[in-house]
Image (tube, rainbow, N blue to C red):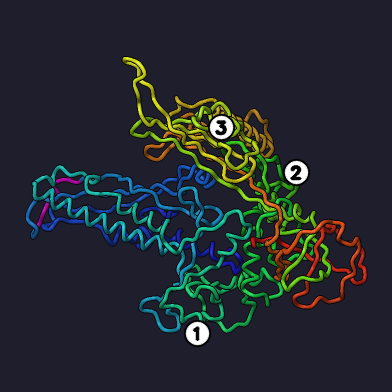
Amino acid sequence: MRHDATLSDDLHRAAIARFLQADVAPERREDHGFQGVLRALFPVKTADEVASLEFVDYQLLAPRCDADACLRRAMTLAAMVKVTVRLVIWEGPREGPREIRDLKEQEVYFGEVPLLSERGTLIVDGVERAPLLRLCRAAGAGEASGYQLRAAGRLFEEHARLGVAAMVEEARARMARAQQRDRVATLMPHDLLNLRPLMRAWSAMLKKSPYFAGFDAERPLARVALAGRVRVDADAREALDAGPFAQWLRRDAADPAFATLAVDAPVNEHGVIACSDAEGDRRTLAARLAPGGEASTREVERTLRALTLSSPEAPLVRGALDRAVAERSGALVVALRAGRVSVANDRRVWVVEDGSAAPTMYALQARGAPGLATPFSLRRVVEAGARVEAGDTLAEGAAVAQGTLALGRTCSVAPAAGLGAGRCRVSSPMREAFRSARIERVEVVTRDTPMGKQRLTREVPLAEAHALRHLDASGVVALGAEVAPGDVLAGVVTPVECVATAPGVWEERMADSAVRATVRGRVVRVDMRSRNIFERGERHASIRDAMERDLDAEAAELASCLAAARGTTIDACVDEAREAHYDRRVSLARGDDMPPGVLERVVIELLVERDLACGDVLANLRGECWTVDAIVDDETIAADVELPEAAGEGQMYLLRLAAQDPPAPVKKRRRASAASSSG
């Protein structure tokens, strides 16, 4: 087990793998996890044991969509489960020798089990949720080890047991009713199993369990802050203050129900914290993000809540864990193995690894509707033909620059008179220098209502012409449009009634259901999905054509990489490359999966940028924080300001932008790196 910032990911992945046993042949699976649940609750028998429903085995199918597609389509990342069950009907009395009268074996759909994405999160209805560790008392264990640090796999097992138990009880009742009516012989296995209890158990776990936390994906350290986050049961809180676990767990000052696990805690794959007297660095991830080690909890939380800047800079002084934290945040793409970059563009990087004939693709943009570049987009830093080693940077994303965390800008500081402690004034160029960005996501759906079908249109009743200026013929805002509050993003009309305008002539009256912008921003992505392929308009067709062109380009790149790795011509690899994308091509030609009653679904993403303002908080790498009191003009700032050798606690500052490259040392000159966070 690795003792680094991915410790919690390792625990969750190992626990879920142990629960699913997906890579184990059915006949070799052990009786734990999902296999143990089914073995323990089956068979289901009638009172006289004339009929018996038995579990045989199960298999897991690949998810219908990858993580990026689930985020885009508001779906849940899950694997389909099919369980083979056997219904045995006996002939003869309960006691004594009996013969099998009938045997029916059937593969039954058992719903979908949630999966972890590559980022270590669960995706539920298009929203990412991070699993939390759980510290609880272990039943029957000794006092010294009386607390099986549980990961998500154990929670999966608990809810699977609840759901399957309810299914089994209902199956037993159905068998009893069939026996009373003398219809046991006509039963089929699928007649006895109702999936709803299991589906409700999965849904309750994913959406309501306190052991899955939502987070703001736009904050660069939001997911990192949950690494090692532990929810402590009420009967296990004493372990935070005494016993062998106290040295590895730090109590949350704000909420006693939570603690933080040290990044180097000796935890094995079963979630057991080994008892050890060895001294070492036991700081938590949050403490390591503040290099001083003496920063208060409030200052650390401000660092973890740092906003994403539109144009951040790498700090001049970098911490030991900055790169590891950048990788953990998902904003740094590194090469898994050594090789040579065969193809590199703004969408993908292909690496032909040493000793391998199959190239590895690193996606820089999610497959789907085309979009515009934002501060959150991955930017490649390698060129075709470059040699890379394992761990080398291939692309950087939000809050990452030069392979490390980049949360702010390098600035010059000076004393500012007349301000209270913890407050500062900034120069006017700093407003744009600390401009922050976020993505506002708007979802629009049309439904089949009792009065008729809703539809997208540019002709929205009661809407002023100025508010409709960004809509195209399909009734959806154009890509790249700069919208303001009140502008219509999608025109939706709903039938409300039908009135007679002439004998035998009826007219549908429509109500305005237009979706309007609530913020000022730029449209950076528009994705449209439709249940019926025959009702797709020009906008649907343009998005589909763009996706097909991207698939063609990806297939051409794959063929080029295969030819380079095998020493053959590109033409010899074209058919193989196109076959690899066959399933995705087929999916483009059919209608999209939609919830019941939904006809069309449109997802609009707005890039919203905000300049630094009074009331915001600036923090340096030492955890010292200042609230912006005023923004002043450049004329009030001296061109060169001499600073004292050492600034005392609570020193007030006046900030101005400084060059990234440090000049030659000058007496009484100091630099500080600042990061912007919400006020």
Q: Which residues are magenta?
A: 97-103
At 70% from the left edge and 60% from the top edge, which residue is drawn?
614
* Residue 591 visible within the image: no
Q: Is residue 303 magenta?
A: no
Residue picked out by circle 1: 242
Question: Label 3 is placed on what type of residue?
Answer: Glu
Question: Label 1 is placed on what type of residue?
Answer: Ala
Residue toward you, 678 or 97:
678
Query: Overall secondary structure of the magenta stretch?
Result: strand
Q: Where residue 592 sits in the image (x, y, percent)?
A: 45, 35
Give the crowd class for mark 1: few <14, some 14-19, many >=20 residues within 10 Å: few
Camera-near label (3 vs 2) is 3
Residue picked out by circle 3: 464
Residue picked out by circle 2: 383
Does residue 30 appear to the left or right of 127 in the view shown? left
Mark 3 element type: loop
In the figure, residue 322 lies in which quadrant? Answer: bottom right
Mark 1 element type: loop
Earlier along the polypeptide chain: callout 3 or callout 2?
Answer: 2
* Residue 303 visible within the image: yes
Residue 664 versus residue 438 in the image, above or below = below
Q: Where residue 390 sits in the image (x, y, percent)?
A: 68, 55
At 55% from the left edge and 74% from the top edge, which residue is drawn?
266
Q: Where residue 93 sits in the image (x, y, percent)?
A: 7, 56
Earlier along the polypeptide chain: callout 2 or callout 1?
Answer: 1
Residue 614 versus residue 535 in the image, above or below = below
Earlier along the polypeptide chain: callout 1 or callout 3?
Answer: 1
Q: Where residue 610 sits in the image (x, y, percent)?
A: 67, 51
Residue toward you, 82 or 73:
73
